[in-house]
Structure formats: structure tokens, C-alpha cells
Image (cartoon, rainbow, N blue to C red):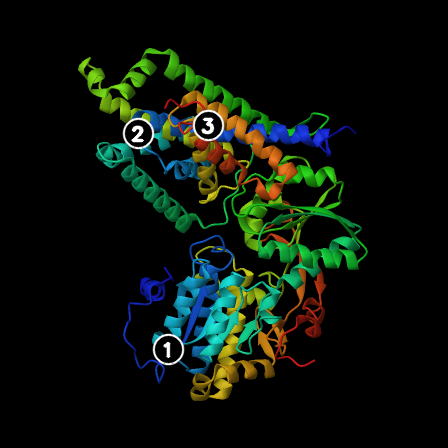
Amino acid sequence: MPLHRRDVLLAGSGLALAGGRARAQGGPLRLGVLTDMSGPYRDLTGPGSFAGARQAAEEFSAATGMAVEVIVGDHQNKPDVGANIARQWFDREGVEALVDLPNSAVALAVSGIAREKNKVVLGSGVGSTVFTGAQCSPNSIQFTYDTYMLAKGTGDALVKQGADSWFFITADYAFGHALQADTSRFVEAAGGKVLGATRYPFPATTDFSSFLLQAQSSRAKVIGLANAGADLINCIKQAREFGLLRSGVKLACLLMTVVDSIALGLPEAQGLLMTESFYWDLNDRTRAFAERVKGKRQGAVVHASCAGCYGVTLHYLKAVKDLGLERARASGLEVVNRMKAMPTDDDAFGPGRIREDGRKLTPGYLFQVKSPAESRGPFDVHKLVATTPAEEAARPLAEGGCPFVRT
Amino acid sequence: MDDIFGIPAPLLFGQLLLGLINGAFYAMMSLGLAVIFGLLNIINFTHGAQFMMGAFAAWMLLEWAGLNYWWALLLVPIIIGFTGVVLERLMISRLYKLDHLYGLLLTFGLGLIIEGVFRNQFGSSGLPYRIPPELQGAWDLGFMFLPIYRGWVVIAALVLCLATWLLIEKTRLGAYLRAATENAPLVQAFGVNVPRMVTLTYGFGVALAAIGGVLAAPIYSVNPQMGTNLIIVVFAVVVIGGMGSILGSIITGFGLGIVEGLTKVFYPEASATVIFVIMAIVLLARPAGLFGRA
């Protein structure tokens, strides 16, 4: 088990090492992966994110001799739980930076705490564009993806293929609404039309056939699925079951990952399009990275969050080294500024940079799920169809409304 | 095209049919709960987890033992029903003399633990389970596409419900069961082994949940949370139908499926809430439920 019992206890309760310790001075540099270890996003982030961050720490330690320790905590998708762990880590455990933060509500809650204590948030699992927009923080990075990239990558591509009338099936909460709104904008800008939408109660829905039938009777060419995880999988299965795909309707999965493709199985998922910023089989460097981290994944696929936590942790450590450990411990803000000043380069994402508002510029890759005949192994599920260049995949800086960015 | 209340008629018929299909699941699940509550006086909150275990057991049989859907339909209720029997003997049987609340807490806690164990073992994103080849494809009904598998689910659910109802209302064994519900010591005095009957009844209720899980596996993704969403609705169905009423839970299950289906057309945001609104109204007007005895 790569997940040490002690780490979990430490992170989960925060009480295991109660009483202030002089960890902040001397000792290894500590990073805390704050993620979903037990809920709906566990397979997309969770243990994989922890593996990625540890991989970066190990490689960096081996190369430079700097001691780095990575611990993990489960925020249970609750902002109050996440905030509690973050405070305990910062105050008692000497943690200098938080990594991952899937679930934007939790990410936004801890971002304020990190700023107040002048620590760092290395967001990899954060999807909301608000994180580097209206509620941006000079102490935070958004590394792997955001809803803008997803909406643009998938929305643009489908309209260009002639799929110009859309109907949305939307999870009735902030994330679903944002995804629908973002995608609608791109569809309309590209000359497409949005014919309607239905919002289903989240998370209490398992049968989507009724909504799929409504979408079908709207005669839209594309059904946009503004949801994720189990809901998405149920939608896709049931769309196939009710013969929607045979009648020529396309599904736009606005947040789908390699994990979902594997969970669905290729016979069900083949042909679907989705946008991600990482795939293990993209090039020689991604394959090399996947090979190195494989041992920490216990037979699960190396996914985008694993790569994102690896990339952002590695870049953070480089900045710390560049700045000197003492100065880095004194000011998280200075480390983040250094991260923005230095170009990024890692095996998972290749060369890139971080923008003033904290958004890492990264290309959006449009993938299509392979057919069972094309696949050569259990993880060989995607093929690259199109690439949105890094500068275009992120929302223009001026549109974000981040208060500390002068444009 | 003819419109009914501003909704095209084909869409409306389609929704009615879908409602009936979902109702089949509600009926099957609430039937198991009603049987258990009727005899054991236990509000079995583990039911959702047992439904999920049924789906997982079907997946395991396929992946690990190479046994297909039809074998699963036969074996899973036996296996999961047996786990129910063990559970009843080891834990639940100790609570009969206590307040309902203790049984509720125990089964609720067990449900959470089982779900957590499965999530730890199999992850949260679900496992694929294909519709068996014999039931793939769909019928074109003119107003909608009806997947053959969904039709099969409705038929299977109806047969199961009817068989259970006949078993309890029309057979000698059913008469013993009903008598034991009324007055257990008296029935025992006539030489009927009531504790064993109680144990087997719990196993039977659990087996019904497991069959529901097998039927659901090809439609919904097989994941540890799959029972959680269903169980709350199913409890509302049982309360509306009248706690412990067999016929009540069957009719209410199908009926509420249809009501929910219609809500999904007219005001989808409320489709998860409408059943609870009905529950509140029924509780105010007839506290014992539509078919319950006060």
C-alpha cells in the first residue's frame, strides 16, 4: 500500500500530532495533498493525485538532495472540513503548500486561508474559472484545467463538424450551470443554436431516460451533458440504450476523463469526444512519466489529476529551490511570484508558463474514445483529434476580472 | 401533432412508460422493505446497500467466475439473501425487543459501512456491465423507442411482485407469516418455529433487493452509491403505501414512478421532490398511509 496509514490518520484527524511542533524551522519541506479520498471524485483525483505529488517530491529530492514530505487529507467534498484540515496543516504541521483541491467550493474556501497565512495553493483539481477570475488569489495556481477549456475544446469542435443545434442536460448546481453557460457561449459564437435545456436534481437522479427523451424530441443534433462522474456515465449508457446515438444524435461530454472511458467500457463509450489537458499516451515524455509513476497507481490508469499534481508540485519545488528554503518558508506569495516568472517544463505537460492570474497555460486536447478494435490494452482508450493551442485554451486575461491583475 | 397541456402526445406517452419502468424498481424495493417491516418490525435501512451488493455480485460472477446474467439472476438472490440471514442471526435478532429506532440505527450504520467498503475496494466511478445479448435492441413503438431490456424489467418486476403477494396472501406459509405478525407467541405455541421464519423472511426481503440490483446493473452504472439515491425514494413509497402493506407498496411503487415521470416533463427540477410532497400530504390526511391499517 503506497498510502501509509500514518499519513491518513495524521491528515484525517489533524490531532495525531497535536501540540505545536517546531516543524516550520528545519526538517523536510511539507506539502499537503487535500483531495477527495472517499467520495464521487475519488477515482478522478484522490489516490492518483497523491501519487503524482509524491512522484514529483521523490524525483526532486533525488536530484537535489532537498528533503520533501507529502501528506494527504480527505476533505470529503465539504468546504468546512477542507478549511479545518488546511488550518491545522498550516498552524501545527508546518505544511507550506496545499496540492490538488478538486471540488471548487473547497478550493475557494481554503484559498482564503492560504492567502491570510501567506501559504500556497497548488490547484490541480480545481475546475471553476472563478478561481483565477473574480475570486483569484495571488497565492494560488490553477494548473491542470478549467471549465472554459472544456467548454471551448468540445463546443467549438462539434459546431465545426456541423453539429450546430444543442440541447443541454444539466446537473442542477453551480458547476452544471457554469458548464452549460460557458458552452452555450461558444456554440452561439461559432454560429450554432441552443434549443433548450433541462435541469435535473443533483445528486438524487439515477434515471436519465426521461431527460434524454426530451432532448430527442427537441430535434437537436447535439445533447450537451453538463455533468460529471456517475451521472455522466448513466447518461451515456442510457442514451445508447434508447437508440439516440443510432438516430445520429451526438453527445457532447463536457467533463469526461480517461477514468470515465474505462469505467464505461469501450463498447459503450466508443466515438465520444472530450477535452483534457493530459493523456498518458500523448508523446514520449508522457509515456515515460506514466511508466515512472505506474508503481504508485496500483493498477489504475495515470490520469490528468495525477499528472497535474506531479507538474505543479515539481514546478513549485523548483521555485522553492531557486528562492532558497528560508525565504520560501517566509512567504508563499514570493514562491508563487517566482513560479509565474519561471517557465514550466515537466514530462507530463512539456514546456509552458503560468499567467499573472495564476492560470497555467496548457493546450486543450480533444480526444475521441477508441473502438474496441483500435484498442491495444486496457488503458489504450483515447486518440487525439484536435489541439487548442495553450494561449487560446485559457480565457483571455482581460475577461477574467481578477482584481490584482492589471490589464 | 396533438398536444396535451402543451406537451406533444408522443413525449407524454413516452414519459408515462418510463415512469412505469422506474416504478417497477420502486415497487420491487419497497416490497422487500414492506415484507421485512411487516414481520420483523425493523426498518431496514441496509436495503440500498443490499441492492448495490446485488449489482456487484452480478458483476463479480461475470468477471471472476464467467457466469452470465441469467446465472446471476438465479445465484445472486441466494448469495446475498444468505448474507441477510447471517446478518439477521448475528445482529438484528438482538434488537427485536427494543424500540424501532435501534433497528433503524443499526441497519443505517451497516449500510454506510458496506458502502464504504465497496467504495474503498472498487472506487467510485463504477464498473461496466453489459445488457445480455438476448435482451439487446429496442422496439419502435411509434411514439418512442422502447429498449427490450426495460420491457423485461417491467415484466420481471410484475411477476415477482405478484408471486410475493400470492405467497403471503394465499398460501399456508403466508398465513403463518401473517399470523406471526399478529401474535408471535400464539403461533409458536402451535408448533411453528417463529424465529426461523423471521430469519428466512429477512433473507427473502434482502434477496428481493438483490434481484433488483441484478436487474439494475445493465441500466445504471454498477457503483457503490447506486443504492443511496434509490433508498430514500423507496422509503417514501413505503410510507405512502402504508408501512408493512404488501399490496400498498406495489401499487404505490408503480403509481409514484408515473407521477415522477410526469414531473420530469413539466418541471424537471422538482422531480426528486415531488414524491416527498406527496408523502407529506398523505401523512397529514392518512397517517397510516394509503393502504395501511391505523
The chain holding disc 2 is B
Q: Is the N terminus of chain A in the top left, top right, bottom left or bottom right quadrant?
A: bottom left
The disc placed on residue A94 is 1
Q: Residues within 10 Å of mark 2 (few under 14, many from 20)?
A: some
The disc placed on residue B204 is none
Residue under numbered circle 2: B41
Q: Is residue B23 above or below residue A110?
A: above
Indicate left or right for A277 with A385 as reference.
left
Residue under numbered circle 3: B28
In the displayed image of the protein, which residue is found farthest to the front? B285
In the displayed image of the protein, which residue is found farthest to the left? B189
Q: Position of residue A45 (x, y in %)?
A: 49, 60
Q: Looking at numbered disc 1 in the image, what kind of residue is underneath it?
A: Gly
The chain holding disc 3 is B
Q: Looking at numbered disc 3 in the image, what kind of residue is underneath it?
A: Met
Q: Looking at numbered disc 2 in the image, what kind of residue is underneath it?
A: Asn
Q: Residues within 10 Å of mark 1 (few under 14, many from 20)?
A: many
Residue at 38 percent across and 11 percent down: it is B170
Q: Position of residue B236 (x, y in %)?
A: 45, 34
